[in-house]
Amino acid sequence: MIKLQKLNGALVVVNAELIESVESAPDTVINLATGNRFLVKDPVDAVIAKVVEYKKQVYSERKVINPLEGFEKK
């Protein structure tokens, strides 16, 4: 999830995994896979940086699970 500021100054938290596109027209428009759209004050480059940072954080914490761990060979 990333924090963005709506045009009225309100904080909105958006699921970065659902972002399909980000437009600059002249305000920044976030289009989600759900069909929802948000107009935000954050510039496009800032939104991209927040998404990249979010994904770095999420995917760096992934752990590889060995499906055979704990399986005793007979």
Image: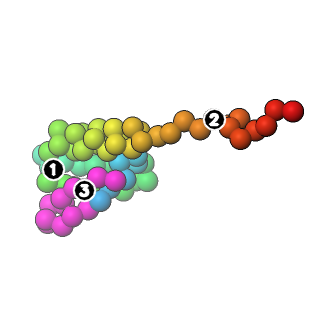
Q: Are marks 2 and 3 in contact (CB under 8 Å)?
A: no
Q: Nearer the viewer, mark 2 or mark 1?
A: 2
Residue located 71% across and 41% down the image: 70
Assess disc 3: are there few (<14), some (14-19) or many (≥20) residues with their C-alpha within 10 Å of its C-alpha: some
**Residue sitting nearer the eye, 46 or 26:** 46
Question: Magenta residues, as a range?
Answer: 1-12
Q: Where is 59 relative to 8, above or below?
A: above
In the image, which disc is placed on residue 3? 3
Disc 2 target residue: 66
Where does label 1 land, which residue? 42
The first of marks 2 and 1 along the sequence is: 1
Question: Of all residues shown, which one is farthest toward the top?
Answer: 73
User: Decide: marks 2, 1 in contact (CB < 8 A)?
Assistant: no
Disc 3 to disc 1, C-alpha distance: 10 Å
Q: Is residue 24 magenta?
A: no
Specify the farthest residue to the right: 74
Residue beneath the point at 76% across and 38% down: 71
Residue 39 vs residue 65, the one in the foreground: 65
Tell me the element at label 3.
strand
Point out which mark residue 22 bears: none
Q: What residue type is labelled 1?
A: Asp
